[in-house]
Amino acid sequence: MSKISLPLESLNAVLDGGVEDGSNVLILADLVVDKMKFGSSLINYRLGEEDNIVYFINNKIPIYAKKGIANYEEKEDKIAFIDGFSSTIGKEPKSEYVVDSKLTDNKSTYIEESMEVVKEAINDMEGWGSSLIIDSVDSWVGHWDALEEFLEGVKPELESTNTVGYYLFPNLGFAEENGNNLERLVDMFDYVIHLKGIERKGITLKYVEVKKPQVEEKIPFDITPRGLVTYIPKILVTGPYNAGKSTAVKTMSDTSVSVDRLGTTVSLDHGKVEKRGIMTDVFGTPGQERFDWAMDFLGQSIFGAFLMVDSRNPRYDRLRDMYESLEDQEVPTIVLANFQNKEDALPPETIEEELGIETVGVDALHGDNVDEALDKLFDKILDKHSWYYT
Ligand SMILES: Nc1nc2c(ncn2[C@@H]2O[C@H](COP(=O)(O)OP(=O)(O)OP(=O)(O)O)[C@@H](O)[C@H]2O)c(=O)[nH]1
Ligand SMILES: [Mg+2]
């Protein structure tokens, strides 16, 4: 048995590398999560890992699903579509594999035939190591016995061909405590991965909860055109006037925007950062006290913060005030001791001692140590962020 990786690094990390070969994986997606995009990301990723794909579609005609697959033309011979839908709407199916029964007829007959076609398609795939995608389980709701038979019937095929079966299922109201049906589903699968979404102060937080095996850690994520990333919605760069906040936002970001007048920030800096499979939005506040409203406004639902210091002249009192409000909200914070390229800069150790907050020395203008500081803050945030969701 070997582990098959999924398109999200931190998810693989909590699963010790991914899911077992030959297993059945239920992917339960809350409605705020675009299940279709998740499915495409999974397929694109597994194609990149040289998998063959058997893609069973029973909720749209396959042509719509093809659109989500990157380099479809190039990979065409690696993907077998099973059209489980056209017959239902009376359309001529064009795929290699077809389920003739209609979804609207006897469900058990439909599911049974689907199983036979899936088995055939898996066995036809050349080479070893594949992914089976079932999109979607929702039309089988209530037909739990038939679903169970399907899973059991397909399982030996998965195992003998080193294939993982992924079953996509929109969460149409299986609330957490909604007992029996969910429990039964969880029993049937080897893995249950719940893609959740909650609304927090105007931000939709999406995160992965692994229900089976039960994993405590939650993984915030987002779906980008290039695939899945761990997503941290808001990191703040704050600190006194002229400490180098705007410079730091610019240096650490792939793309950024600042609104400055006569060299001082009058609105928020905003940058997008993507590294180590983690994406985040970074916001820099204006440093002058007359702009403290920006902090009040941004200070809600911050995931982490950099407190920027001019190491030649740390304004400790102002910094302590600023830190207090972050501390109240238990925001993971790192002090950036900036201007380390200047002779008269105090060393980060001195500042850390004075403030009692983890401090990293940086030169924001030239980017020295900025990546390291980001890594540290990411780790701090991901270590403790599970409480955001409770
Ligand atoms: N030499 C050097 N110059 C820096 C460094 N960081 C920032 N600067 C310069 O310091 C000046 C102020 O930097 P900003 O990034 O605008 O400071 P800020 O904290 O955003 O300022 P406000 O928004 O007005 O509070 C700019 O001229 C930067 O180029 C650094 O590490 N080394
Ligand atoms: Mg600024």
Image: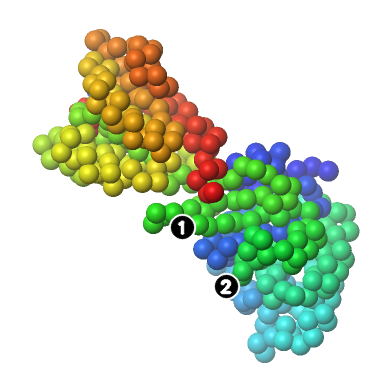
Label drawn at residue 64: 2
Q: Are marks 2 and 1 in contact (CB under 8 Å)?
A: no
> Residue at the location (51% across, 63% down)?
32
Is 284 left, or right, of 189 in this rendering?
A: left
Where residue 336 sits: x, y (%)? 35, 24
Q: SS class of the residue under badge 2?
A: helix
The quarter holding residue 188 reads bottom right
Q: Is mark 1 within 8 Å of ligand 2?
A: no
**Residue 27 versus residue 144 in the image, above or below:** above
Q: Position of residue 247 (x, y in %)?
A: 27, 32
User: Quick one: which residue is furthest to the bottom in this view?
Assistant: 90
Q: Is residue 57 visible?
A: no
Q: Sequence-wise, which precedes: disc 2 or disc 1?
A: 2
Q: Which residue is farthest left?
A: 262
SS for tag 1?
A: strand
| Residue 386: image location, x then y, percent | 55, 43
Q: Is residue 247 left or right of residue 276?
A: left
For residue 351, side relative to residue 137 (left or right)? left
Drawn side of residue 36 relative to residue 56, left or right: left
Q: Which residue: 40% across, 46% down? A: 301
Q: CA distance from mark 2 to mark 1?
A: 29 Å
Q: Quarter of the image holding residue 237?
A: top left
Q: How is the image coloured?
A: rainbow
**Badge 2 residue CB within 8 Å of ligand 2:** no
The quarter holding residue 171 reads bottom right
* Residue wearing tag 1: 199
Which residue type does callout 2 highlight?
Answer: Tyr
Quadrant including the N terminus = top right
Q: As rendered, which of 273 and 54 lies closer to the eye?
A: 273
Kind of residue at badge 1: Glu
